[in-house]
Image: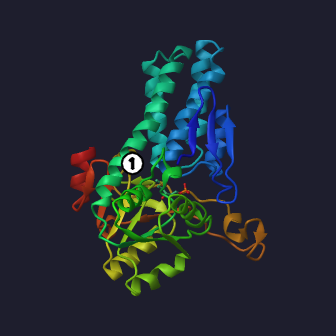
Amino acid sequence: MDAIRWQGDSLALLDQTKLPVEEVWEDYTDYRKVADAIRRLVVRGAPAIGIAAAYAVCLAAMELQCQDTAQFRAGMARAAKVLATSRPTAVNLFWALDRMTLALSAGGGGPEAIPALVREAEAIHREDISMNRKIGKYGAELVPEGARILTHCNAGAIATGGFGTALGVVRAAHAAGGVEMVYCDETRPLLQGARLTAWELMRDGIPATLITDSMAASLMAQGKIDIVFLGCDRMARNGDFANKIGTYGVAVLAAYHGIPFYTVLPSSTIDMSIPDGKHIVIEERDPAEVTHFAGVQTAPEGIRVCNPAFDVTPHKLLTGIVTEKGVIHPPFGERLLELFG
Ligand SMILES: CSC[C@@H](O)[C@@H](O)C(=O)COP(=O)(O)O
């Protein structure tokens, strides 16, 4: 299962805004439209955003290849800026753009660098899938026999290059026969859990139950959740992390009920340049996402709205962090530095 395909001179994206009702792939040749697709959540999920941006840099270079060197370089800098302002929170976007900028300079800085840029974007894509496979293997070892797992948002194959982070763990654990049920929080306001996670799990034949976000507490109190796995958009070097709004609430609930709570991420999601979660920029999105549901108004016109797309969970609420280098336990700051510093 995938949502991003490089086609040599164009990028195909599965339009995630249309799932689960329609499976529509769109072709992109204009990097500006890819930036807009990232903004509109056609492509979403931290690793997937980075991969799409890397391919968009290739599209920019192809568009600019007939310009003289100075114009090519100025155009590439402009394209990187447009892509960097698409969404602020997931660090994978900036990590991928930095890699592409280095590949551009290493390749000569001009249109002659196009093959090197394509190779780099493909490497970013391929490495992400391979990190997810390793993450799945390590994470599956944490899953108790007959586990009932809770997840939030969508950290699946379509949020990554393929296989998924939190859902990669679920896939690996299910293949080993260890999963009784995956409870998916619907994930207000844009329903990534209901529209995307439920869809991915059903397609793979993994037992899944959809719940509204407000049901998680009651399920935990009834002893129906054994372990929580969810994704990450940016982790600071002390282990504080941003993920889809509602994650912090799930973390508090899990701590209260004594349920193991893990975030699952590739190293491309770790931002060692910031000391803690206070430094993570949280994206504020359109109020209409809260006041309207599928185009239908559900709140009075003119009501003030607060719509942060992410929240920050303090590292103290984490049982562990699942990465491609293994599972990290406290003290997170020291272990992150050792493995990723
Ligand atoms: C492997 S995806 C990890 C995170 O990016 C995911 O949990 C998440 O919060 C996605 O938010 P979204 O706003 O849908 O891009």
- The way the protein has been coloured in the rendering is rainbow
Amino acid type, mark 1: Asn
Question: Is residue 180 depicted above or below 60 in this figure?
Answer: below
Give percent across and percent down for residue 283.
Answer: 56, 56
Q: Position of residue 40 (x, y in %)?
A: 66, 51
- Quadrant in the rendering for residue 150: bottom left
Give 32 or 4, whichever is nearer the viewer.
4
- Residue 1: horizontal and vertical position, in percent? 52, 48
Question: Which picture quadrant has residue 280?
Answer: bottom left
- Residue at 53 percent across and 51 percent down: it is 158
262 w.r.t. 95: above or below: below
x 45%, y 50%: residue = 163
- In the image, residue 7 above or below residue 202: above
Horizontal side of 338 relative to 287 (left or right) equals left
Quadrant where the C terminus sits is: top left
Mark 1 packing: few (<14 Cα in 10 Å), some, or many (20+)? many
Front-most of residues 13 and 246 = 13
Q: Residue at x 45, y 52 (%)?
A: 164
Residue 242 visible somewhere in the drawing: yes
Label 1: state its secondary structure.
Answer: helix
How many numbered discs sit on the rendered protein? 1
Residue 17, given in percent of the width and then of the height, sits at: 66, 55
Residue behind mark 1: 132
Q: Is residue 238 visible?
A: no
Label 1 beta carbon within 8 A of ligand 1: no
Q: Is residue 89 left or right of residue 221?
A: right
